Amino acid sequence: MAVKRVLQYGEKSLREPSKEVHKVSKKIHELVQDLLDTMYAKNGVGMAAPQIGVNYRVFVVDVSKNDEPLNPHVFINPKIIKKSGAVIAQEGCISFPEAYTDVKRYSNVTVKALDINGRAFILEAKDGELLSRAIQHEYDHLDGILFIDHCVNRFETDKVLAEHNLPPVEPEKLADDSELDKELNK
Ligand code: ZN
């Protein structure tokens, strides 16, 4: 068990793209365990490897509620192969303690990835549920994209970030959400 330090917004590694995993080795198993331990210690629903300073394409998600048994999902070399619908909801990130803002996401995503045994699987997350948002959020981390890059209102988000002593939105990093906007206006 190893709870790692979680990088905070402003630290460079969070903006760096992560590398593909070539072999689901013992080292990757240890990384997954560290991610799970750290996520549970921080009461998060997801954690991506770059958040603990390891730039590999690995993330974990567990959207089980407090009174439910743990239900960890492990995603190695994930690819989002289908997305549709759009939804706006409040979102936060363990790298942005206590800061929440409205973020645009797809309602439905289908993701293909390898599991902890290196076997490929496909998972469909629907209806804008937490699992769908968490997958999109953690997936973005692997490309150095942060939830605030999809914020609905940059100035509102800046206000929230300032209240939590975090740096402001980086305007040049704001995502092109034209596809999402099209879905939202349907
Ligand atoms: Zn995050």
Image: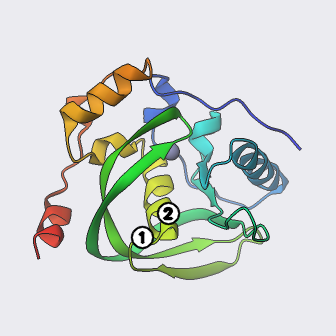
Query: Which three-letter amino acid code belongs to the residue tagged 1?
Result: Ile
- Mark 1 neighbour density, 10 Å: few (under 14) some (14–19) many (20 or more): some
- Mark 2 neighbour density, 10 Å: few (under 14) some (14–19) many (20 or more): many
Task: Pick whichever of labels 1 and 2 is earlier in the sequence.
Answer: 1
**Label number found at residue 135:** 2
User: In this view of the protein, which residue sits in the foreground, 21 or 86?
Assistant: 86
Residue, disc 1:
80
**Residue at the spot 67% in from the left edge and 65% down from the top edge:** 65
User: In this view of the protein, which residue sits in the foreground, 156 or 93?
Assistant: 156
Between marks 1 and 2, how big is the CA–CA gap? 9 Å
Above or below for 43 versus 120: above
Q: Secondary structure at mark 1?
A: strand
Residue 29 at x, y percent in the picture: 80, 56
**Residue at the spot 21% in from the left edge and 36% down from the top edge:** 154
Q: How is the image coloured?
A: rainbow
Residue 26 at x, y percent in the picture: 84, 54
Q: Is residue 27 left or right of residue 10?
A: right
